[in-house]
Image: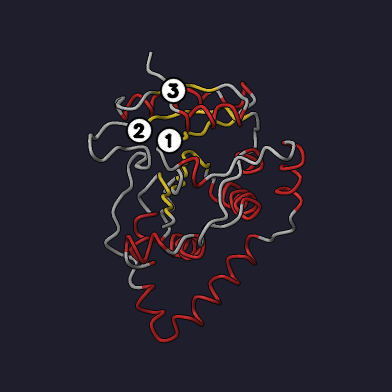
Amino acid sequence: MSKVSKSAQAIIDYLGCEYVYIPKGSELSAVNSAYNELFAKREAGGYTPIIFAVDSSFEDRVMFDNSKSRVELQKEVTSAEIDAAKWFRDALTRWKEEMGGDWDEVVGEVADGEEMRGFSGMRDYGTGKSMECVIAKIPVINPWEIFAWFPFGGWNECPMPEEMFRICKYWYEKYGAVPALMTHDVLEFAAHPVTDKAAALDLAMEQFAFCSDIVFQGIETIGRLADSLTKSSIWYFWWD
């Protein structure tokens, strides 16, 4: 059996819940299969699974606050009064004001987007195999409550955990999107394609407000992102 790394063990200890461990260098299909099996049993098991793809930067980026009880941390995240729809509107207003006449170019045409297949955040691009993974069975039925259990976010332009909580709830209720994978700087959701192009553009606007790096350092335009969302079952976010 492969030895669990220090970073992976820190995640396991912090979460304090059941998990499946998958060593570095495993086939990507093995991680996907393990996740899908756990996801299929989530309601009966009373949990929501999520993949933690672990590298040496994980502990540096994600702070494990052991000075507060889990109840205290959950209260901080869940009690924040944040309207996700307004959060998106306000963020987009700021972006439009900042971009000025360049905004239409940032939006572009709803075309030329690529289909996202499978989780990419867990891939070791040097080997094509998986990173070390911990698939945690977070003991919550509502997927957005993952962010009240594990404090992801709050660095650079990445939303705070309490914003993650409300945004994920909004996206789950509107699109059925479920947070499925985290690394130290990546968050991926499992979701169904949004086949209506107007709805996909609205969602792409929200995703840009949530994580502008996926456009400016990735897919290049919001319209191209929208076209990708019409055929993809994975939503990918990365914060530099």
Query: Looking at the rendering, in which quadrant would you find the C terminus?
Result: bottom left
Where disc 3 sits, the SS reads: loop
Badge 3 is on which residue?
A: 4
Count of numbered marks: 3
N-terminal of the pair, mark 2 or mark 3, is 3
**Side of 7 relative to 107 (left or right):** right
Marks 1,2: beta carbons within 8 A: yes
Where is residue 21, by image quadrant? top left
Q: Assign a secondary structure to mark 2.
A: loop
Q: Decide: marks 2, 3 in contact (CB < 8 A)?
A: no
- Give neighbour class at mark 2: few <14, some 14-19, many 20+ (Cα, 10 Å): many
Q: Is residue 89 left or right of residue 22?
A: right
Q: Which secondary structure, mark 1?
A: strand
Which residue is at the far bottom?
101
Quadrant of the rendered structure where residue 48 is? top right
Q: Cα distance, mark 3 to mark 1? A: 10 Å
Identify the residue under disc 1. Answer: 54
Q: CA distance from mark 1 to mark 2?
A: 6 Å
Work out whether mark 1 precedes mark 2 in sequence or the reverse, and give the earlier one.
Answer: 1
